[in-house]
Structures are given as structure tokens and as C-alpha cells.
Image: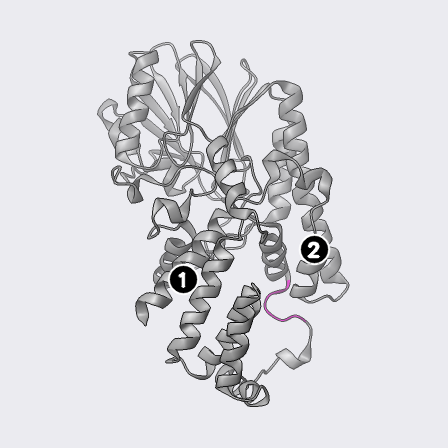
Amino acid sequence: MIRPDAEQLLKEFSATAYPRQVTEIIPGVIYHVMGYGHSNASFIIGETSVILIDTLDTDYRGEALKAIIARHTDKPVKTIIYTHGHPDHRGGAGVFMDSEPEIIAFAPCKPVLGRMNALEDVLNQRGVRQFGYELSNEEAISQGIGIREGIVQGEGQRTFVPPTTVYSEAKIARDIDGITLEIAAAPGEAEDQLLIWLPAQKALCCGDNYYGCWPNLYAIRGGQYRDISTWVDTLDKLIAYQANYLLPGHTHPIIGETAVAETLTNFRDAIDYVFTETLKGLNQGLTMDEVTEAVKLPEKWASLPYLGEFYGTVAWSVRGIYAGYVGWFDGNPTNLNPLPIRNRAEKTIALMGGTESVLSAISQALDNKDAQWAIELADILIAADSTNKEAKQYKAQGLISLGHLETSANGRHYYLAYAKELLTDL
């Protein structure tokens, strides 16, 4: 979300949303670890061993997690459960292999699109921009839902270990070292996401299907469509457990049955509202831009501290849903066979009075703090002539301005990282 106080809001959120903290959820049994990695971890002390849920993002941080566990028990980690396969949740696994744990995961509910590996280069490039891997700490501020990953902080490397037990069932029950667990498929942010329910303690580990800000219903780095209808269904499933404790994969745990129910219900209803209103607009024949402009999160949800747009944004969510349901065509036949980009740009520039006239307009837009208009004009010049250094410099200037106005850490990173790339190439 673009707003003048975005940078300060992101700093305030980042300072309070995931402090370094170990919370004793059930004395002597369940612990939640936050702020020691980009993601959280939880551990459960059984009769003779420890069940670890996620492992933080690098080996260095995994060692810190191992030391935290050792402060509470001398029992070895004999079970690891991955809530899902994202790197920040399993990068520290390697440091726990001395105790030869069983590693549990769920298979994806839907297969990955075929030949996805053909996009490895572009998705990696976009991921580097989204996460701000090449930005300084001052530029990046945070990674939105957690501290910056260890791989960019000089705090170790990812040490992935594949699961030894992979379930394809919808739900399984396990008794592990005296701890009764229900583990169920819970697709949402990831297709292999699972939830872990401890009925005796009424504690629920939800992975990344809830965390304390607007989620990445669509990730700007790109990737397979995240099924929002299924995500809402999963949130209904989480609510139905009536948990006393909710342990998310990022940000604070929620404690108390009333607080858990209220938080999850608001989170679920806000997502469902955006999803429903997007489909309504689409069904009315609105274009993607028109739907995005029309769908706004009502204040009753937008004002909640755990629904701020510091990671995903409502606008990107709307665009992701639109594209996921009807694809690239907006229904306007003008866009079925558009002019080649360079041809259209050259004609547009001619109508605007030539390159110098457009450059002057860009400069004026930047002076007037109209950065979005400036970069759109710059793109026209760059489309007509990819060697136009002045247009690229102006675009970088506009991107930097927008980066400082973006509440989402992901959006901020992408603006600033792209600007640095442009300036480096000049």
C-alpha cells in the first residue's frame, strides 16, 4: 500500500511483530520460539525426546534453536515436523541430524505445474528482489513477517534435509513419545502446508496460514496460483478446533480461546471479503485495474493490528485472484492483438511531442512527487529505446520514491532492488 508514512509504519511493525522471545505455552511441555530466525519454531517435550516443529532458516540459527531447547530439557530431538516446504522453515534442519530424527511432512494437495524448473532463473531473480537479498539492512528494514534471513546476515547457510515420512492422507493421528498429535493437510499459502493439533493441550500449530499481517495471497516474485477458496476453507478448519493456543509460523502466538477465535475469524472474514468482492467485480465485466480500484478492505478489518499490509497487499491479492480465475485477457477486444510494445511506444512518444517532451514531463512529475506517473512515462521511453540512460535514471529515481512510500516489505524491496539494478547497468 502506498502512503506517505509507510516507512515509519513498516519500522514500527517490524520492531514489535516478532521480538526475540521464547514463550512457554504449556509449562514443561510446549514452547514457541520467535525472533531467532525469519520464521518461528515450536517444540514439544515428550517422555524421552523432543518433537520440533520447523527448524528456522539456517544452520547458525538452528544451532541457536538447539541451545534454546537444551536450556529447557536434555532430551534429544527425535522428531521434526515441517509445516511446509518453504526454505525459511527447514533451513536449520541439518544441525539436528546427530539424533537421527524422523522428519515428517505432507505431500502437496495439488501437484506443481509441469516444467516449473524452466522458470528457475527468472523466479530466483524476482525472489531476490522481493526479499531484498541485495539490499542493506537500512534499505530493507525487515522481511515483513520476520527478521531478515540468515543467508543475507552472515548467519550461516541453509542445511535442508528431506523428510523421511511423507503422508498423502488428509489427516493422520500419531502418538509420539507420549504426545498425542493430529496432523492434517491444510493447503493455503503452500500446497504442502499442514496443521498440528494437540488435543490434550488444545494447542494448534498453523504454519503460514495465519500470521499477524495481510498475507501473501499472491507473491510478487511469481509462482503457481494460491487457491484462495481453499485457503478460506482451511481457516474454517482452524477455527473449528476451538484452540486455546495458536502457534503461527511467523509473528506472535495467540493465547486464549476467545482471542484465537476472534483473530482467526477476522483474518478469515477479511480474506473472504476481498476474494468475494473480486469475483463479483470480475463477474460484472470489470477489468483487472477496475476491480483493483474498487475492492478495498473495510475499516473494521483494515484497522486491526494483525491485518496491516506489511507483507502482502489487498491490491496484489485482487490482481492475483483475477489472473487465477480468468487469465490475462480483460474482456476488451482492443487487447486481443495489441501493437508491438516498441511500435506503440514510438507512436505514443510522437503524439506527446517527442522524447525531450516526455523527459520534461517525467522530470516535472518527479518534482511534483507523482512518482507512479513518472515511471510509467519512463517505461514508454525505455520501450522505444532500451539504451535511453536518462529515462532509466528517472525511472530509478521514481522507484526509490515509491519504495519509501510502500508499507509492504516485499513491495519496498522490489522497488529499491530494481532501482539499484537500473543504476548499476547505466
x and y, in percent, of residue 46 in the image: 39, 13
Local packing at callout 1 (Cα closer than 10 Å; few below 14, some 14-19, many 20+) is: some
Picture quadrant of residue 37: top left
Does the magenta-highlighted stretch encompass residue 74?
no
Q: Of the residues tagged 2 and 1, which is closer to the observer?
A: 1
Give amino acid for label 1: Tyr
Please give the residue where the numbered disc 1 appears in the rendered image: 418
Give amino acid for label 2: Thr
Q: Nearer the viewer, residue 18 or 188?
A: 18
- Residue sitting at x 62%, y 25%: 260
Quarter of the picture containing the C terminus is: bottom left
Picture quadrant of residue 99: top left
Q: Which residues are magenta?
A: 326-330
| Gap in angstroms between the C-alphas marked 2 and 1 | 29 Å
- Residue sitting at x 67%, y 38%: 303
Q: Which mark is residue 96?
A: none
Q: Is residue 419 visible?
A: yes
Q: Secondary structure at mark 1?
A: helix
Q: Secondary structure at mark 2?
A: helix
* Magenta part, dominant SS: loop
Q: Is residue 244 above or below residue 358?
A: above
Q: Is residue 193 visible?
A: no
x and y, in percent, of residue 285 in the image: 74, 67
x and y, in percent, of residue 47 in the image: 37, 9
Query: In this rendering, would 274 be left or right of 347?
Result: right
Please give the residue where the numbered disc 2 appears in the rendered image: 278
Q: Nearer the viewer, residue 177 or 372?
A: 372
Q: Nearer the viewer, residue 99 or 166?
A: 99
